[in-house]
């Protein structure tokens, strides 16, 4: 009885310490996160004028949204462009990084070298510098114009697709994927790191048990590794989705960002909110389906 | 049953089986090597291309018989041009002061938050965790404009604005163009991708054995004392991982610095502006007919990457090992 009372005391004390450790974070969340988030919703519904004493807001209702959806000719193209990139990149990045993580998790000579090599994109890929490098080497070489010097060395993907006689839409998908191969592989850095960490946390006793039971490698992957990775896969998917949506390489973000820097704050707020709501909807749907059909099966 | 049959099977068939197994594994390891090398090539190709291009003159660039080995060098010309155009030393200092220092602050303040969330139970913990996931999910772009506008008149919950209305003295500070714009969010653990860093920390702290900390409690150490002298010393691995991530993200950040600053940009800002700077400084327009600027541009990229590459080479051994042990994903 006495002990229980004392425990409660400690727990109360501990809960107080919990708040103590997180106070500064909560203050930060209010000032630097929640407030700006609300403000940006307000901005998207108003007309902003910059005056000497900060800004002046003028509520205009859905005028901004009307402007970008009905009048602005570019916005819809930007959104559809960005969305298609997002939708086809996501599964490829996840599959690719999972496969690579599985390979890098095995024991073989030169493993450390390859790991170091495959983590290289983590350092560079989030940066502005990669945009410049890709502009001159990757898929959109023509923008600066070194393509003349380089495309001569490369086999044309179009020719191969034509040669194999694949029909329209699939062919277009293949060409697009291969021409974006630099982009896709370079987006796998952190995903590989996360998957590797997940693979490390699978208890080895499970593999030993399956070996005793005489499971094949395929069964081992399908019934142990994949289910044990399901949480990591969800985390990686969410992370990849956020990365893809906000990447400076997407058409929409690139354009919106340059508009922002030019001082157009109200319309860009509406643009971003509309785009992120669509993306968030898709993201929610994917997470829901994933939980419904993949996570439930193993729990 | 299988084992029994195996034991009784003749020596020859067992040997054959072994040989077949060996053959399969050789084929597999060859296959693995091919895949690793080919995807590795995709990763290394842009880097090699960048380095090679940064070394050579424009004449070599127009020479179509050359592929990888530069024929005419213009190392000094390219690099000095890029060095000057980026105002390298000045921007490096700006990066150190604004970005890397705020990365260090972020690493420290996120550790506190994560320890609080991982070790103690309190009523609002579920709400806090939900908020944490929200900060991971909501893109930085979304709150960029209001943040920037708030920074020009930094106010604490409208108190200072109210004070101004009453007394007429404006205490609201403009922290744009000062390092505070980077330091303050980091100090409050809501800086660049703090959510993910806190998440990594939490996963690690949850795995730390509680016994030591409880012993410290019994011996009368306060929570901060316990955190500083028990929890932190045994979490060097996770601190390294988080520091590397935070440093890389801050080093590469051109988005925030582009909005918060109007001059004295950090390196990431300079490199994303480099095509325009080259245009205004050397009157170079990047075009296929005049490949002069490409050497400069790539030299700039190399100058930007090299410091991070050096850091990576120093820490990569620990970093790669630490991933095995941190268990980021729980």
Image: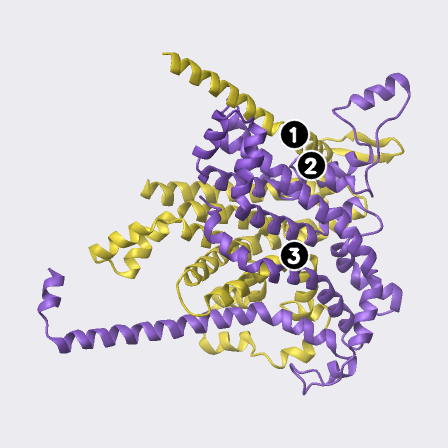
Chain to which mark 2 belongs: B
Asked whether residue B292 appears in the rendered view, the answer is: no
Which mark, by number, is residue B322? none
Q: Colour of chain B?
A: purple
Secondary structure type for disc 1: helix
Chain to which mark 3 belongs: A
Question: Measured along the vertical axis of the image, is residue B125 above or below residue A259?
Answer: above
Question: Measured along the vertical axis of the image, is residue A274 above or below residue B325?
Answer: above
Query: What is the CA distance from the residue labelled 2 to the residue labelled 3?
Result: 30 Å
Residue located beneath label 2 in the image: B187
Looking at the rendering, in which quadrant would you find the N terminus of chain B?
bottom left
Q: Are marks 2 and 3 in contact (CB under 8 Å)?
A: no
Q: Residue A120, position in %: x, y?
A: 58, 62
Residue located beneath label 1 in the image: A24
Residue located beneath label 3 in the image: A249
Query: What is the CA distance from the residue labelled 3 to the residue labelled 1?
Result: 34 Å
Secondary structure type for disc 2: helix
Q: Is residue B243 left or right of residue A205?
A: right
Query: What is the CA distance from the residue labelled 1 to the residue labelled 2?
Result: 8 Å
Q: Residue A259, position in %: x, y?
A: 77, 48
Q: Residue A144, position in %: x, y?
A: 73, 70
Q: Are marks 1 and 2 in contact (CB under 8 Å)?
A: yes
In the figure, residue A280 lies in which quadrant?
A: top right
In the figure, residue B299 lies in which quadrant?
A: bottom right
In the figure, residue B23 lies in which quadrant?
A: bottom left
Q: Residue A205, position in %: x, y?
A: 29, 50
Secondary structure type for disc 3: loop
């Amino acid at each position: 009885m006495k002990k229980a009372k004392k425990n409660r005391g400690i727990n109360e004390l501990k809960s107080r310490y919990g708040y103590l450790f997180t106070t500064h974070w909560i203050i930060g969340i209010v000032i630097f996160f929640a407030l700006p988030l609300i403000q940006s919703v307000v901005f998207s519904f108003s007309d902003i004028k910059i005056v000497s004493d900060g800004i002046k807001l003028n509520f205009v209702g859905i005028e901004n949204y009307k402007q970008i959806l009905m009048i602005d000719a570019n916005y819809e193209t930007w959104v559809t462009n960005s969305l298609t990139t997002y939708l086809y990149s996501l599964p490829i990045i996840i599959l690719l990084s999972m496969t690579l993580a599985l390979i890098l998790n095995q024991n073989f000579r030169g493993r450390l070298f390859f790991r170091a090599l495959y983590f290289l994109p983590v350092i560079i890929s989030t940066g502005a510098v990669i945009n410049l490098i890709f502009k001159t080497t990757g898929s959109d070489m023509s923008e600066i114009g070194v393509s003349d010097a380089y495309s001569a060395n490369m086999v044309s993907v179009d020719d191969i697709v034509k040669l194999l006689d694949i029909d329209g839409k699939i062919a277009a998908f293949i060409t697009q994927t291969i021409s974006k191969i630099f982009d896709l592989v370079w987006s796998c850095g952190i995903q590989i790191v996360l998957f590797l960490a997940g693979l490390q946390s699978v208890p080895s006793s499970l593999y030993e048990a399956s070996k005793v039971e005489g499971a094949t490698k395929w069964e081992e992957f399908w019934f142990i590794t994949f289910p044990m990775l399901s949480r990591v896969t969800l985390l990686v998917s969410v992370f990849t989705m956020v990365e893809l949506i906000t990447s400076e390489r997407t058409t929409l973000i690139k354009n919106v960002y340059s508009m922002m820097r030019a001082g157009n704050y109200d319309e860009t707020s509406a643009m971003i909110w509309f785009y992120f709501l669509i993306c968030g909807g898709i993201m929610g749907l994917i997470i829901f389906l994933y939980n419904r059909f993949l996570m439930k099966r193993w729990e | 049953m299988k084992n029994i049959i195996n034991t009784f099977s003749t020596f020859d068939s067992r040997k054959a089986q072994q040989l077949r197994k060996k053959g399969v594994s050789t084929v597999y390891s060859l296959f693995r090597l091919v895949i690793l090398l080919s995807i590795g090539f995709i990763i290394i190709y842009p880097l090699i291309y960048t380095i090679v291009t940064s070394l050579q003159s424009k004449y070599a660039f127009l020479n179509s018989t050359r592929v990888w080995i530069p024929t005419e060098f213009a190392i000094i010309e390219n690099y000095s041009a890029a060095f000057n155009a980026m105002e390298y030393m000045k921007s490096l200092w700006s990066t150190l002061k604004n970005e890397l220092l705020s990365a260090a602050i972020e690493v420290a303040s996120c550790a506190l938050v994560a320890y609080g969330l991982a070790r103690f139970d309190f009523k609002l913990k579920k709400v806090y965790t939900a908020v944490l996931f929200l900060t991971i999910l909501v893109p930085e772009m979304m709150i960029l404009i209001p943040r920037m506008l708030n920074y020009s008149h930094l106010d604490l919950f409208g108190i200072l604005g109210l004070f101004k209305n009453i007394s007429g003295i404006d205490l609201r500070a403009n922290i744009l163009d000062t390092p505070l714009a980077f330091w303050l969010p980091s100090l409050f653990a809501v800086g660049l991708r703090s959510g993910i860093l806190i998440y990594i920390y939490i996963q690690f702290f949850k795995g730390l054995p509680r016994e030591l900390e409880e012993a410290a409690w019994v011996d009368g150490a306060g929570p901060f004392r316990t955190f500083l002298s028990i929890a932190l010393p045994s979490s060097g691995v996770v601190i390294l991982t988080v520091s590397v991530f935070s440093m890389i993200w801050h080093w590469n950040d051109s988005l925030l610095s582009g909005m918060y600053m109007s001059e004295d940009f950090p390196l990431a800002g300079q490199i994303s502006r480099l095509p325009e700077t080259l245009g205004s400084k050397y009157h170079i327009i990047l075009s296929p007919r005049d490949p002069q600027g490409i050497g400069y541009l790539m030299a700039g990229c190399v100058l930007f990457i090299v410091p991070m590459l050096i850091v990576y080479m120093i820490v990569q051994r620990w970093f790669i090992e630490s991933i095995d042990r941190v268990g980021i994903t729980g």
